[in-house]
Image (spheres, helix red, strand yellow):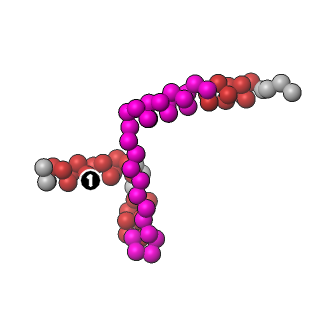
Amino acid sequence: MAKSKKEIQQDYLRRTKYKSNNKYNKEKTVMFAIRAVTATEQDIIQRLESVGNKSGYIKRLIREDIARNP
Protein backbone atom coordinates (compact mmCIF):
# COMPACT_ATOMS: atom_id res chain seq x y z
CA MET A 1 0.00 0.00 0.00
CA ALA A 2 1.32 3.44 -0.89
CA LYS A 3 2.16 5.91 1.85
CA SER A 4 0.02 8.97 2.33
CA LYS A 5 1.46 12.46 1.96
CA LYS A 6 1.41 12.86 5.75
CA GLU A 7 3.34 9.63 6.28
CA ILE A 8 5.92 10.66 3.68
CA GLN A 9 6.38 14.03 5.42
CA GLN A 10 6.75 12.35 8.82
CA ASP A 11 9.37 9.99 7.42
CA TYR A 12 11.27 12.93 5.97
CA LEU A 13 11.21 14.77 9.30
CA ARG A 14 12.49 11.70 11.11
CA ARG A 15 15.35 11.32 8.64
CA THR A 16 16.41 14.97 8.66
CA LYS A 17 15.19 17.12 11.52
CA TYR A 18 15.44 14.63 14.34
CA LYS A 19 18.89 13.61 13.20
CA SER A 20 20.15 17.20 13.10
CA ASN A 21 18.55 18.01 16.47
CA ASN A 22 20.19 14.98 18.04
CA LYS A 23 23.55 15.96 16.58
CA TYR A 24 23.19 19.53 17.89
CA ASN A 25 22.12 18.32 21.33
CA LYS A 26 25.00 15.86 21.50
CA GLU A 27 27.60 18.48 20.53
CA LYS A 28 26.32 21.65 22.22
CA THR A 29 24.18 20.78 25.22
CA VAL A 30 24.29 18.91 28.50
CA MET A 31 21.32 17.57 30.44
CA PHE A 32 20.91 17.31 34.21
CA ALA A 33 18.05 15.33 35.71
CA ILE A 34 16.88 15.15 39.30
CA ARG A 35 14.42 12.93 41.11
CA ALA A 36 12.17 14.20 43.86
CA VAL A 37 10.65 11.87 46.43
CA THR A 38 6.94 12.61 46.63
CA ALA A 39 6.74 11.76 50.34
CA THR A 40 9.51 14.10 51.52
CA GLU A 41 10.01 16.72 48.82
CA GLN A 42 6.45 17.74 48.06
CA ASP A 43 7.34 21.42 48.54
CA ILE A 44 9.87 21.25 45.70
CA ILE A 45 7.46 19.36 43.47
CA GLN A 46 4.66 21.86 44.05
CA ARG A 47 6.94 24.82 43.35
CA LEU A 48 8.22 23.38 40.08
CA GLU A 49 4.71 22.41 38.99
CA SER A 50 3.52 25.97 39.60
CA VAL A 51 6.21 27.48 37.36
CA GLY A 52 5.60 27.68 33.62
CA ASN A 53 9.24 27.56 32.52
CA LYS A 54 10.95 25.08 34.82
CA SER A 55 14.29 25.23 33.03
CA GLY A 56 14.40 29.03 33.13
CA TYR A 57 13.36 29.08 36.79
CA ILE A 58 16.09 26.65 37.82
CA LYS A 59 18.74 28.47 35.74
CA ARG A 60 17.74 31.81 37.31
CA LEU A 61 18.04 30.36 40.83
CA ILE A 62 21.48 28.97 40.04
CA ARG A 63 22.65 32.28 38.52
CA GLU A 64 21.42 34.16 41.59
CA ASP A 65 23.36 31.75 43.78
CA ILE A 66 26.50 32.22 41.66
CA ALA A 67 26.15 36.01 41.97
CA ARG A 68 25.89 35.72 45.77
CA ASN A 69 28.75 33.21 46.07
CA PRO A 70 31.30 33.80 43.28
Q: In the displayed structure, would residue 8 be above or below residue 38?
A: above
Which of these two is toward me, 55 or 52?
A: 55
Q: Based on the displayed image, in which of its 4 quarters is residue 49 positioned?
A: bottom left
The residue sitting at the bottom extreme is: 39
Which of these two is toward me, 3 or 49?
A: 3
- Residue 6 covered by magenta stretch: no
The residue sitting at the right extreme is: 1
Q: Is residue 5 visible?
A: yes
- Report the residue at 54% width, 29% height from top: 19
Q: In the displayed structure, would residue 44 be above or below residue 65?
A: below
Q: Residues within 10 Å of mark 1 (few under 14, many from 20)?
A: few
- Report the residue at 38% width, 42% height from top: 30
Q: Is residue 16 left or right of residue 64?
A: right
The magenta-colored residue range is: 15-41
Q: Is residue 61 left or right of residue 48?
A: left
Q: Position of residue 57 (x, y in %)?
A: 33, 51
Which of these two is toward me, 51 or 7?
A: 7
Q: Position of residue 45 (x, y in %)?
A: 42, 64
Q: Position of residue 8 (x, y in %)?
A: 71, 25
Quadrant where the image shows the N terminus: top right
- Residue 17 covered by magenta stretch: yes
Residue annotated with mark 1: 61
- Report the residue at 42% width, 65% height from top: 36
Kind of residue indicated by mark 1: Leu
- Report the residue at 38% width, 37% height from top: 29
Q: Position of residue 52 (x, y in %)?
A: 42, 51
Q: Is residue 50 visible?
A: no
Which structural element holds mark 1?
helix
Q: Based on the displayed image, in which of its 4 quarters is residue 10 positioned?
A: top right
